[in-house]
Image (cartoon, helix red, strand yellow):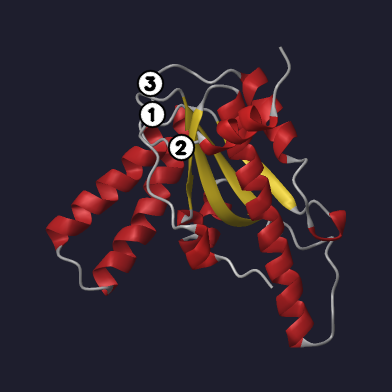
Amino acid sequence: MSTTTSDLHHFLRTRRSIRRFTSDAVPDSAIERILTTATFAPSAHHRQPWRFVVLKSSHSRATLAEAMAIDFERDLTADGVSAERIQVQVRRSKERITSAPAAILLCLDMSEMDSYPDKRRTKAEFRMTVQSVAAAAMQLLLGAHAEGLGGVWACWPLFAPETIQKTLSLSELWEPQGMVFLGHPQDIPQARERKPLYEITLFL
């Protein structure tokens, strides 16, 4: 039986952000298919500036979680958050990283993008690169959905790029942008309410 347009829209609309996973491992073959699908996302100038770091081992995730927790605790302390609340938030952050069977760090690499002598176009070029990596992240999540896996996007790496680069021994050219946690869902939540099109769309 052929897949209809309605089937495809139903598939796209049934993707959910999954934050709790079973302990089942994610096969390497599935991760490779997901990442390959992610590379078919559109990108500025077709430069494909996304870079992926797959954190499959529990050791790599635990090491990164501990390093990021130091930065997180420092920032919360500077914000005046109570010590008790800091411990709760830091523990939750570490658990998010260590409890997922797999995590994929998404980075951007500006080395192959265009360069300009003025700030306006330089800023625009950087934004185009960020948008390209974000497009790959969405494609990655849909690839995981196609595999019957759950995933969730987290932006924490934006707050600790140098710590992540140092902890994972990454090139300085690989700028952390986000992290996607993957695994088999413990449960699939209901869709959250979406804003109606008439509130967010302008037809001219």
- Residue at x 80% of width, y 51% of height: 48
Q: Amino acid at mark 2?
A: Arg
Residue depth check, mark 1 versus mark 3: number of the one nearer the observer: 1
Disc 3: CA contacts within 10 A as few (<14), some (14-19) or many (>=20): few
Please identify the quarter of the rendering in which residue 91 is found. Answer: top left
Say whether residue 40 is left or right of residue 203.
right
Q: Whole-Å distance between the Cαs marked 3 and 2?
A: 16 Å
Q: Earlier in the sequence, mark 3 or mark 2?
A: 2
The percent position of residue 172, horizontal first and vertical second, equals 67, 59
Say whether residue 43 is left or right of residue 153.
right
Disc 1: CA contacts within 10 A as few (<14), some (14-19) or many (>=20): some
- Residue at x 20% of width, y 52% of height: 87
Q: Whole-Å distance between the Cαs marked 1 and 3?
A: 12 Å
The residue under label 3 is 22
Please identify the quarter of the rendering in which residue 192 is found. Answer: top left
Q: Disc 1 on helix, strand or loop?
A: loop
Most foreground residue, 193 or 202: 202
Most foreground residue, 74 or 36: 36
The residue under label 2 is 16
The residue under label 1 is 188
Most foreground residue, 60 or 100: 100
The percent position of residue 100, horizontal first and vertical second, equals 42, 31
Q: Earlier in the sequence, mark 1 or mark 2?
A: 2
Asked whether the beta carbons under mark 1 and mark 2 sit within 8 Å of each other, the answer is yes
Say whether residue 75 is left or right of residue 141.
left
